[in-house]
Image (cartoon, grey):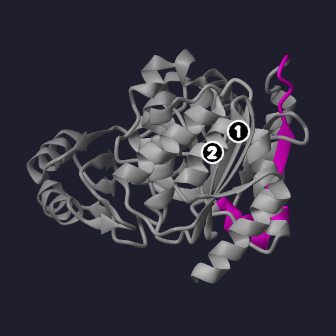
């Protein structure tokens, strides 16, 4: 789950990380009021869950309340990468002397969080990693000991931070790590963390990604989800508790089990095709869930064929077949479908699908080859 900048920074503040004074506005008049309360220059920042807001014209500096109102009026309603700006953040402008990158992610190979910093702040860290990887300084965080002061000192030295800022830098870095762990985040990022004209440190931008699987532990964070986040397919998948990831291939996949789904995608690639999605309906899925999954797949115009790979353990194959037939009554399609059903009530399920003129296969490799052939024939 992605959080907006203003949400991320408010969470950062709970962990002792200094952020600019500011509030959100949904109308130009609200932006004017906030700017008047802050006094002086303010930054008007569009709140949409995509990158590149500044390049799209979604971040502007205003010298006073009048200009803030005008700029907010131009930014509100903008379309940025397909998302409409409905909220802006009005922050007090910082006296920026230098910009730094600071972030925490999981290093899966090391099985622990890693703190990353770079003196090249204000730009995407992926671009820094590509063009100048030596500019990124990293240190792993022991899950039992936490971030130690000698680690942040080494990072500070590595990015050329003045000694007078080491203590403040450690407080912010340690707070960011605590925030990352305490929120079950997969990313907590300050970009940029700025050095101000009075030799202070200030988090003027923030970004957090929360692990969806942890949200049952964080109802307060779950309540922050923006309903407009992601595509219709992703929202529909969440509604029916389906694990869905959009990809760029032409063969739609519906599978029960994450490992089986990965294997299915591998065999599609091996057979000369490309998966259009990862979609795991999970164990014990009933017909309504199966129907929802198929509707999501068929809504993708890129899909030229669908591969249904079901292992009937907890999930009954005839129940899955019923869901497929239910979905086909709701969504008219000419997309060819290949079904591989194995396990509980597999014969009944295959019979139901064969009667509806769907292609069936007994092995996964055979199903993948049939799906690829059907997709290439359709294109």
161 displayed left or right of 60: right
Closer to the camera in the image, 74 or 358: 358
Q: Residue at x 39, y 40 (%)?
A: 6
Q: How packed is label 2: few (under 14 Cα within 10 Å), some, or many (20 or more)?
A: some
Give the total of numbered labels: 2
Label 2 close to label 1 by CB (< 8 Å): yes
Q: Which residue is drawn at 54% across and 24% down?
A: 215
**SS of the residue at dot 1?**
helix
Give above or below for 130 relative to 6.
Answer: below
Q: Does the magenta stretch include residue 293?
A: no
- Give the residue pinned by disc 1: 347
- Give the residue pinned by disc 2: 351
- Which region is colored magenta? 125-144
Residue 16 is drawn in which quadrant? top right
180 displayed left or right of 294: right
Task: Name, please, the residue furthest toward the right.
Answer: 110
* Residue 59 x %, y %: 35, 62
* Residue 236 x %, y %: 42, 43
260 displayed left or right of 231: right
Q: Which residue is drawn at 47% across and 46% down?
A: 325
Residue 348 is drawn in which quadrant? top right
């Amino acid at each position: 789950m992605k959080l907006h900048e203003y949400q991320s920074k408010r969470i950062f503040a709970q962990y002792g990380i200094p952020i600019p004074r500011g509030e959100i506005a949904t109308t130009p008049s609200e932006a004017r009021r906030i700017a008047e309360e802050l006094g002086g220059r303010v930054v008007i920042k569009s709140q949409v869950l995509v990158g590149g807001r500044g390049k799209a014209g979604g971040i502007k500096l205003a010298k006073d309340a009048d200009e803030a109102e005008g700029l907010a009026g131009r930014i509100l309603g903008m379309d940025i990468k397909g998302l409409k700006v409905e909220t802006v953040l009005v922050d007090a402008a910082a006296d920026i002397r230098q910009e730094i990158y600071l972030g925490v992610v999981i290093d899966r190979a090391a099985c622990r969080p890693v703190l990353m910093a770079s003196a090249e702040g204000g730009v995407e860290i992926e671009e820094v990693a590509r063009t100048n990887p030596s500019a990124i300084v990293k240190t792993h965080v022991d899950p039992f000991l936490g971030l130690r002061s000698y680690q942040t000192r080494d990072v500070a030295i590595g990015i050329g931070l003045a000694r007078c800022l080491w203590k403040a830098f450690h407080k912010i870095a340690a707070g960011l790590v605590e925030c990352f762990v305490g929120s079950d985040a997969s990313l907590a990022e300050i970009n940029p963390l700025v050095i101000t004209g009075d030799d202070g440190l200030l988090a003027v931008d923030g970004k957090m990604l929360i692990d969806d699987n942890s949200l049952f532990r964080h109802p307060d964070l779950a309540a922050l989800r923006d309903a407009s986040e992601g595509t219709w397919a992703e929202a529909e998948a969440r509604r029916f508790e389906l694990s869905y990831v959009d990809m760029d291939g032409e063969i739609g996949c519906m599978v029960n089990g994450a490992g089986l789904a990965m294997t299915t995608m591998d065999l599609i690639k091996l057979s000369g095709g490309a998966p259009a999605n990862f979609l795991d309906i999970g164990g014990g899925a009933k017909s309504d869930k199966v129907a929802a999954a198929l509707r999501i797949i068929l809504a993708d115009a890129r899909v030229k064929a669908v591969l249904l790979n079901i292992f009937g353990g907890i999930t009954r194959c005839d129940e899955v077949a019923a869901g497929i037939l239910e979905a086909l009554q709701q969504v008219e399609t000419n997309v060819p479908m290949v079904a591989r059903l194995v396990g509980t009530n597999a014969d009944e399920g295959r019979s139901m699908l064969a009667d509806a003129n769907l292609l069936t296969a007994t092995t996964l490799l055979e199903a993948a080859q049939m799906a690829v052939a059907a997709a290439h024939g359709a294109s």
